[in-house]
Image: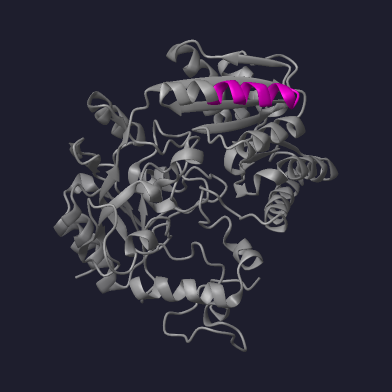
């Protein structure tokens, strides 16, 4: 029996897509720079169906890729041309909200913001809040270890997932972790979160709920330059204040946000900081006075304080819309993602602008300043010959700057297919071999989201370490040595 016949026996006709035009709907994720039309798309409605599909793929040695809402920005959900794309968007039930345990159990297709909406009547919310939280799914958040504006204080997805039901690459349904804060033994849960679909498919997620804070106060501070805004960020953290969020936007990203959503940020600002504090009222009030003073001391020429939740949402509106808003000022752009120490913010931002000017492109900076997670948006026009290439060069140079200053090539968008070639710049051969051994322990046949994360995937039967001669995948023309 062929794979397609097996899939037809397991799924209803409307759950199986083979028409070429319909398949093109799934040819990329949020990073449209890379496009591959999958051979087959399946839309399972249960964990058992996911397991049946993966088991069939394993037995037929056919690659598969899991996809949630498709909002990823690293090509992590890019399909395989000869493989099956498993779309989890129909697994969208919130199975339980348990405020007494501070837990919720959800399927992977549940939208991030829906978890908070379900928990709020009980006095809780789900802390990780990517800018795409109105459309991104929990399964994708788990795959990429997504963060968000409030990850400075509350951490990334990995800090809020306590248990998973997972379909392994051979089609078995297993559980990792549970409702307890920690489970004994190897941290397989920690290995899975952020593995970008290379270790299997999550079909159920147990998440930690956070108590709604007593008080939330939000401040918008406008500065003449990113240097001063960066200095204010460092000063706030150095003072022992850990806000829920510190976000920065430069002049170009402010221009885009104004064009898109008319957020009304202070005119003439070279940069703005959005600082949000939450917690007990007495503590927040004391910290707020300190933050206001530090912003003023570091050059803020205007500060605004949200008087109520409506004004708070208005302040956040510009930041939350920034990525999409850049489309108002540039026909094409690359969303980059890297991390640097907070103290390096002024130096790195200056250098980014210099590199952009050297190559004749513009870069809009909008990012999580509190933890040094940069999101430079490299602007270009693909219709102008050479601009796309220059934008790619600048994008790579930004990652080199992050590494040079002790940072990382990704903070929350993942490696995917987009950054795989940069992995050897950050990790040694031994590092990469060790990572591959973990991957091979889960997926010895290499069928789970192949071609992602690692630049030159080693065959799982190979002994790790340095090798002579061409790698078999290089000889086959499906991998490149960097």
Q: Is residue 350 visible?
A: yes
Residue at 57 percent of width and 47 percent of height: 33
Q: At which x and y percent is residue 330?
A: 67, 31
Q: Nearer the viewer, residue 354 or 54?
A: 354
Left or right relative to 380: residue 431: left
Q: Nearer the viewer, residue 105 or 33?
A: 105
Left or right relative to 43: residue 352: right
Q: Which residues are magenta?
A: 287-299
Task: Pick the quarter of the image with the C terminus.
Answer: bottom right
Residue at 62 percent of width and 35 percent of height: 239
Q: Is residue 317 visible?
A: no
Q: Tell me if residue 423 comes above or below residue 345 in the rendering.
A: below
Looking at this view, name the residue that lies furthest to the right. Answer: 358
Q: At which x and y percent is residue 346?
A: 75, 40
> To which quarter of the image does residue 199 belong?
bottom left
Q: How many marks?
A: 0
Q: At which x and y percent is residue 182?
A: 29, 57
Left or right relative to 261: residue 397: right
Q: Main secondary structure of the magenta part?
A: helix
Residue at 72 percent of width and 58 percent of height: 404
Q: Nearer the viewer, residue 166 or 269?
A: 269
Question: Is 78 a magenta residue?
Answer: no
Looking at this view, name the residue that lies furthest to the top. Answer: 307
> To which quarter of the image does residue 85 belong?
bottom left
Q: At which x and y percent is residue 388?
A: 70, 46
Q: Nearer the viewer, residue 426 or 15?
A: 426
Task: Pick the quarter of the image with the N terminus.
Answer: bottom left
Q: Tell me if residue 126 comes above or below residue 424 in the rendering.
A: above
Question: Is 298 a magenta residue?
Answer: yes
């Amino acid at each position: 029996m062929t794979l397609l016949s097996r899939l037809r026996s397991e799924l209803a006709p409307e759950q199986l897509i083979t028409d070429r035009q319909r398949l093109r709907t799934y040819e990329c994720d949020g990073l449209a720079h890379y496009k591959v039309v999958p051979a087959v798309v399946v839309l399972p409605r249960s964990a058992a169906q996911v397991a049946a599909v993966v088991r069939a793929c394993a037995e037929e040695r056919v690659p598969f890729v899991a996809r949630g809402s498709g909002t990823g920005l690293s090509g992590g959900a890019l399909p395989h041309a000869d493989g099956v794309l498993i779309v989890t968007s129909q697994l969208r039930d919130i199975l339980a909200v348990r405020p007494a345990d501070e837990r919720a159990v959800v399927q992977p297709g549940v939208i991030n913001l829906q978890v908070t909406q379900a928990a709020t009547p009980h006095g809780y919310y789900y802390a990780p809040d990517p800018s795409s939280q109105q459309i991104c799914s929990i399964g994708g958040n788990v795959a990429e270890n997504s963060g968000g504006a409030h990850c400075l204080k509350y951490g990334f997805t990995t800090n809020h997932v306590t248990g998973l039901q997972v379909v392994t690459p051979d089609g078995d349904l297993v559980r990792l972790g549970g409702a307890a804060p920690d489970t004994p033994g190897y941290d397989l849960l920690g290995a899975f979160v952020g593995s970008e679909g290379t270790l299997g498919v999550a079909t159920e997620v147990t998440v930690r709920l956070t108590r709604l804070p007593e008080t939330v106060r939000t401040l918008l501070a406008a500065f003449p330059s990113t240097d001063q805004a960066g200095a204010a960020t460092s000063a706030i953290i150095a003072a022992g204040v850990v806000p829920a969020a510190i976000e920065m936007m430069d002049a170009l990203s402010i221009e885009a946000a104004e064009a898109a959503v008319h957020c009304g940020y202070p005119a003439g600002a070279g940069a703005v900081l959005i600082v949000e504090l939450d917690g007990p009222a007495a503590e927040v009030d004391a910290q707020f006075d300190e933050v206001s003073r530090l912003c003023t001391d570091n050059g803020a020429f205007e500060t605004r304080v949200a008087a109520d939740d409506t004004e708070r949402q208005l302040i956040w509106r510009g930041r939350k819309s920034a990525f999409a808003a850049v489309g108002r000022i540039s026909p094409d752009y690359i969303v980059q993602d890297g991390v640097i120490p907070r103290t390096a913010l002024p130096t790195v931002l200056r250098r980014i602008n210099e590199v952009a000017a050297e190559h004749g492109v513009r870069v809009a900076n909008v990012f999580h300043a509190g933890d040094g997670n940069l999101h430079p948006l490299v602007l270009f026009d693909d219709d102008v010959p050479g601009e796309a290439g220059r934008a790619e060069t600048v994008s790579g140079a930004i990652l080199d700057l992050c590494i040079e200053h002790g940072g990382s090539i990704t903070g929350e968008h993942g490696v995917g297919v987009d950054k795989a070639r940069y992995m050897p710049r950050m990790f040694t051969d031994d590092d990469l071999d060790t990572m591959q051994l973990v991957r091979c322990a889960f997926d010895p046949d290499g069928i789970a989201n192949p071609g992602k994360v690692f630049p030159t995937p080693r065959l799982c039967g190979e002994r790790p370490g340095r090798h002579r001669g061409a790698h078999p995948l290089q000889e086959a023309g499906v991998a490149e040595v960097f």
